[in-house]
Structure formats: C-alpha cells, structure tokens
C-alpha cells in the first residue's frame, strides 16, 4: 500500500540482509487481523509503503549461522513482534513483548502479505503437527492476545468469564475460556452470532443492546475480556463486574475510555489492558491449542484477492477470521 486510501498492489523489494540470528520464511498463509485493518484505514500511525500481515505461517527457507532451534523446512509461525533487544530487563525476564526496542512485523517493516519474510528467529515459533496452517495462522496474533490475559491473570475454572465482541479475537477467547473450564458468557452486538458463539464455548449469549439481558448479568463477571475494534459503552460493561473482578481490554480502537469511579471503588475492580504475549506464553498457547483442539473458524482466500477480502472485513462479512493463502 503506497499511501492512504490506496488499494494494495503487487510489488517487489529487497529484504534486509539475513543476520546471524535471523530466519527466512517462505510464507504459505497469513491471517488478516483487525490491527491490519486499523493500519490500512490509517486509524493508527503508519509509514508507507505498508505491507500488512502479522499472523504468518510458512516454511523455513534459510537460517543465520547462529540459529540452533530451527531447521530448513520447519513449519513456523510469526506474530505481531519480529524482534527485541535481548539485553534489557524485560527481555532477560522472558517478557520480550515489553521491550522498548521491540519491532513490529508490519509497522516500520514489511509484513506477511508477501511470499517471504526475514525476522529474528526468537520470534518464529514451531507449529505443532495437530494444527493445520490455516487454523494456526490466527493463533499467532488473535490467539496469543486472548490467551495471555487468561494465563497472566491466573483465571480459574470456578470463575465466571465474559467475552465482549465476537470476532477474530473473541471467538478464540470463547474457546480458551471453555477449555479453562469457566462459566462463559458472550456479549455481542450481532444477534445472529448466538448459535456459533455457543458452539465455540459460550454457556450464555447476550445481545449488548438488550437492556433486560444486560441487567440480569449485572455484578456477575469475575473476568471480562473486551475485544471490540470500536469504542464501546464502558459504563455498561463495568456494571457487569463482580467484586474484585478484572475487566481486561485487548481491542484497540483509537479511543479514550470513560468510566464511573464509584463501582471501581465500591467493588475493588481492576481495569487492565493486554498487548500480545511473550514468546514463552506463545509456545504454551500453541501447545494448549493443539491439546484442547482450539480451532479458529477461518475463511481462506488466495493472496491475490486481498483487496476484496479487506472490503468484506470492512462490511463485517467475515466469520470469524480471513486467511490469505499463497
Ligand atoms: P474483528 O474480527 O473485526 O472483530 C471485532 C468485533 O468487534 C466484531 O466482530 C464485533 O463483534 C465487534 N464490533 C465491531 N464494531 C463494533 C461496534 N461499532 N460496536 C461494538 N462492537 C463492535 O477484529 P479482531 O481481529 O478480533 O480485533 C479486535 C480488536 O483487537 C482490534 O481493535 C485489534 O486491533 C485489536 N487487537 C489487539 C491486540 C493486542 O495486542 N491488544 C492484538 C490483536 C488485535 P460483535 O459482532 O460480537 O459485536
Ligand atoms: Zn493482530
């Protein structure tokens, strides 16, 4: 994409030189995350030319001479993060996603709507055999983003969990919540998603515009994951929380949130955010997904159809993740 409001075009570029710790991956599949759409629609800061794509699956084609953990031909996945400094305290603690020198796969670098990519091999993850490539692609961003809060907040099977926004992230979050053994409620602005949300793992489905149904859920949630790509009614969501509940935001509209103070004080609530996840948690998430048969619901399209697929995404026609195939 050469500038705002331009369609994506096919073009060629020279990759960065292959560093000693880098890996070159021949891309077979790339999921389209709503973050790609935020970039394409220049809702986030972006530099051009933009090559979106950060839910990448492919085969290792070449390796730097220091790389020990991968082989040529290994099937790997790459998510939002392509590198970190490996020297700061966050990196040394295994929290590389907080590194201030981290680089994103498709911001300031050319991403996964491509035939090949070179990244730091620490951010290329072997894909378990149980996961097909089209199923695995969305796990590399959507999957890790919704798994990491469950893992970090130590969510228990006894907890009542809500997922607000049943799109790419939300439909995977329902599957994780079920696999964690929780009582699960899906909150959606789209009544037509009820049947599928229940097959993904929701015990209950609430249409967010249904005031009576929302009222019944007041004070019930120990944990609420908000994945909506647009700003939402925060005052209504905070009322859903049980005492000491955690409302965790992962959806990233370019917006400010406004919350009433009283329920936060009265019920000791925690409002938090979460950004992707660390490489260690990524590996745990992939293994967990294989073992619990977590299966993103994907629609696969040839890479050449990318502009049409973006239009479908914009008009909410994708259920629940589009994956491009080379
Ligand atoms: P998506 O597939 O487009 O799903 C977003 C969902 O938000 C929609 O399916 C819809 O669910 C809901 N929604 C859309 N418009 C809405 C509106 N006007 N009001 C209320 N709800 C609305 O997007 P995604 O790929 O899941 O990404 C979701 C968000 O997460 C994006 O903002 C993305 O940038 C962000 N993200 C953050 C991270 C991170 O590290 N924190 C990582 C990846 C993505 P219903 O129909 O069920 O209401
Ligand atoms: Zn993403």
Image (cartoon, rainbow, N blue to C red):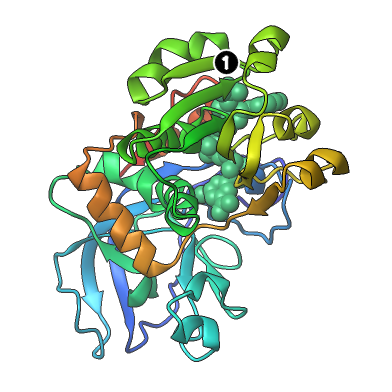
Position of residue 128 in the picture relative to residue 179 (left or right): left
- Residue 98 visible at all: yes
Vertical order, 317 against 63 (above or below): above
Q: State the quadrant of the C terminus.
A: top left
Mark 1 surroundings: few (<14), some (14-19) or many (≥20) residues within 10 A: many
Q: Residue at x 38, y 52 (%)?
A: 140
Q: Quadrant of residue 59?
A: bottom left
Give the residue at mark 1.
Answer: 206
Q: Which residue is at 54% across, 89% downward?
A: 88
Where residue 76 sits in the image (x, y, percent)?
25, 60
Using residue 137 as the reference point, say whether residue 6 is left or right of it: right
Residue ID at (30%, 71%): 24
Where residue 262 sits, quadrant-wise, is top right
- Res. 177 image quadrant: top left
What is the x, y in percent for residue 320?
Answer: 43, 27
Q: What count of labels does the image hold? A: 1
- Locate ligand 1 by image quadrant: top right
Q: Is residue 239 above or below residue 282?
A: above
- Indicate left or right for 250 with 266 as reference: left
Residue 131 position within the rendered picture, expressed as x and y whole percent measured from the top left: 20, 44
Q: Residue at x 28, y 53 (%)?
A: 286
């Amino acid at each position: 994409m050469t500038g705002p409001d331009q369609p994506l075009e096919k073009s060629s570029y020279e990759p960065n030189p292959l560093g000693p710790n880098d890996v070159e991956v021949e891309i077979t599949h790339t999921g389209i995350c709503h973050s790609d759409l935020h970039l394409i629609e220049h809702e986030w800061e972006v530099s051009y030319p933009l090559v979106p794509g950060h839910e990448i699956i492919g085969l290792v084609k070449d390796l730097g001479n220091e790389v020990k953990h991968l082989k040529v031909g290994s099937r790997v996945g790459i998510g939002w993060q392509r590198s970190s400094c490996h020297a700061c305290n966050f990196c040394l603690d295994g929290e590389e996603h907080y590194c201030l020198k981290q680089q994103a796969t498709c911001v300031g670098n050319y991403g996964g709507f491509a035939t090949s990519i070179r990244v730091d091999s620490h951010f290329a993850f072997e894909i378990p055999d149980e996961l097909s490539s089209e199923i695995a692609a969305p796990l590399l961003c959507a999957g890790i983003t919704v798994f990491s809060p469950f893992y970090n907040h130590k969510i228990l099977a006894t907890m009542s969990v809500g997922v607000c926004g049943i799109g790419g992230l939300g439909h995977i979050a329902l599957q994780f919540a079920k696999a964690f053994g929780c009582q699960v409620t899906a909150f959606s602005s789209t009544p037509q998603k009820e049947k599928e949300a229940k097959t993904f793992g929701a015990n209950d489905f609430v249409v967010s515009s249904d005031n009576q149904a929302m009222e019944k859920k007041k004070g019930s949630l120990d944990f609420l994951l908000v994945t909506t790509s647009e700003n939402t009614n925060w005052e209504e969501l905070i009322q859903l929380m049980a005492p000491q509940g955690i409302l965790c935001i992962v959806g990233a509209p370019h917006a400010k949130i406004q919350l009433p103070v009283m329920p936060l004080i009265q019920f000791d609530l925690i409002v938090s955010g979460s950004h992707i996840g660390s490489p260690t948690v990524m590996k745990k998430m992939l293994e967990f997904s294989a073992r619990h048969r977590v299966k993103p619901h994907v629609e696969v399209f040839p890479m050449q159809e990318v502009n049409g697929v973006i239009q479908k995404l914009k008009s909410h026609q994708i259920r629940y993740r589009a994956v491009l195939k080379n």
